[in-house]
Amino acid sequence: MWCWSPATCAQRWAAGSDEMSSLGWSENLTAGGIFSAPITDRLNPWADANKAYLLYCSSDAWVGNAAPSVATGGFAFRGQAIIQAAIADMTARLGLSASSSVLFGGCSAGGRGALFTIDYLAEMLPRGAALKGLLDSPLWLDMQPLDTFEVSLQAQTLAVLAMVNATGRIPPACAAAYPGEAWKCVVTREFNRSQVPR
């Protein structure tokens, strides 16, 4: 999912640094499902589409914008910049244009980050490009954990907002709806009905 304090980030780093850095990753990736190629999977409706698979290494659900500091335990959180750089690269290399259709999604924390980021992504794409979301398992429930040693989602989200500098991704309308509780804007998704296709 993510880390929310210098201590939990250090634990996450020790358990598997590939969730917090791309330095040890292989240069090549083989992925199936919607990422399979037409030569191997004729049943995949997206087999001939251009695809980009962003491996999750920011540990901030793609919402962070923080340089390394004492407050971050020396880690950088650049989920926002990763998304922006990926879209800029795809626009340049793949020729994204007003006639392009983009399917943007993720799984688990990546799905939550995609849900939280999709409105900002629309602003990064060429004007007129169609954008849809495909979200796999992004549901986070605001419930007290059954085990008393677990940290609640609310406490985690409050800490993440403070540590990774995600407040720039809080929609003003949501912040106004939840004064003093901006963390709710990360775990909920409210649609502006004027923007929902009919």
Image: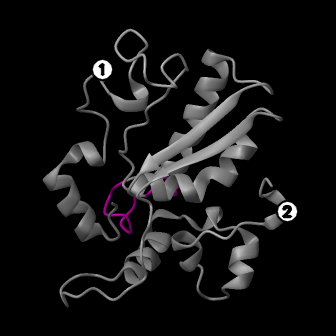
Query: In the visual, does 198 lie left or right of 143?
Result: right
Query: Looking at numbered disc 1 in the image, what kind of residue is underneath it?
Result: Glu
Relative to residue 113, is residue 55 depicted above or below?
above
Q: Earlier in the sequence, mark 1 or mark 2?
A: 1
Q: Residue at x 56, y 57 (%)?
A: 115
Distance from Cα at disc 1 to Cα at disc 2: 43 Å
Which label number is shown at residue 27?
A: 1
- From the viewer's side, name the closer residue of 185 and 71: 185
Principal secondary structure, stretch drawn in magenta: loop
* Colour scheme of the picture: one colour
Relative to residue 139, is residue 113 depicted above or below?
above
- The answer to whether residue 118 is seen in the rendering is yes
Q: Is residue 74 magenta?
A: yes
Q: Provide the residue span drawn in magenta.
A: 61-75
Label 1 residue SS? loop
Q: Residue at x 46, y 79 (%)?
A: 158
For the N terminus, the quadrant is bottom left
Q: Quadrant of residue 14?
A: bottom left
Coordinates of residue 179 in the picture (x, y in percent): 67, 88
Q: Is residue 174 magenta?
A: no
For the C terminus, the quadrant is bottom right
Label 2 residue SS? helix
Query: Looking at numbered disc 2 in the image, what kind of residue is underneath it?
Result: Ser
Query: In the visual, does 171 lie left or right of 136?
Result: right
Pointer 2: what residue? 194
Coordinates of residue 12 in the picture (x, y in percent): 22, 58
